[in-house]
Image (cartoon, helix red, strand yellow):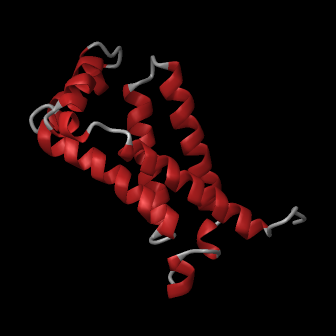
Amino acid sequence: MDTIWLSGAEWLAVLRIGLGLWWLESWRHKDKKSWFQGGGITWAADVAAKHRWNAVRSGFDVVVAPRPRTMAYVVAYAELALGLGLIAGFLTPIALVAGLLLNGVYFALMIHDWAEQGQNSMMALISVVALFGMSWQTWSMDNALGIF
């Protein structure tokens, strides 16, 4: 593979780190006080209640609605863990698959919002490329520790 400036593995590491920064920004920009008091979950509940897919409505009612505070922490700290893990390249394949799953959940919930579809589609595409390109081969703790 011919590339300019960096090797192919290094470009994949740049892509992985950029995705990690994107997840970190998703965590950073949240109003934590409002989010952890249920603001984010209340907003998501309103979106889920109007969703055209019954599976999304009922899934939200079963999994998220009974435990809004816990789910607010799960979402926020999942974004933080994904961001830090991808930037550092620690447990990278696991972080990429977990990010794909989180993007899938966001994508299904926000299927009617074109802006969210674009963001989650791009994040999912980067995750797939970083996963199948084995982006943890360079500039990663995984490589330094000899895992994966």
Which image quarter is the N terminus in? bottom right
x%, y% of residue 3?
87, 62
User: Eyeballing the image, is 86 above or below 50?
Assistant: below
Is 145 on the left-hand or right-hand side of 38? right
Residue in the picture at 72% in, 69% down: 9
**Residue 40 image position (x, y, % from top left):** 25, 31
Percent from the top left, x then y, of residue 71? 19, 42
Relative placement, left or right, of 11 versus 36 is: right
Classify 111 as above or below 64. Answer: above
| Left or right: 95, with 69 as reference point | right
Q: Residue at x 64, y 56 (%)?
A: 15
Residue extending farthest to the right is 2
Q: Nearer the viewer, residue 4 or 143?
A: 4
Q: Quadrant of residue 33?
A: top left
| Furthest-left residue in this view | 66
User: Does any portion of residue 133 appear in the rendered image?
Assistant: no
Image position of 142 with respect to 68: above or below: below
Tally of numbered tags: 0
Residue 85 appears in which quarter of the rendering?
Answer: bottom left
Residue at screen point 51% across, 78% down = 142
Pick the front one: 60 or 80: 80
Query: Is residue 80 in sight in this rendering?
Result: yes
> Which residue is at a point 51% across and 70% down the rendered structure image?
89
Q: Horizontally, is 16 left or right of 82 in the view?
A: right
User: Of 112 and 80, which appears nearest the observer?
Assistant: 80
Residue 138 in picture, x, y percent from top left: 65, 75
Instruction: Answer above or below: position of 110 versus 17.
Output: above
Residue 70 occupies quadrant = top left
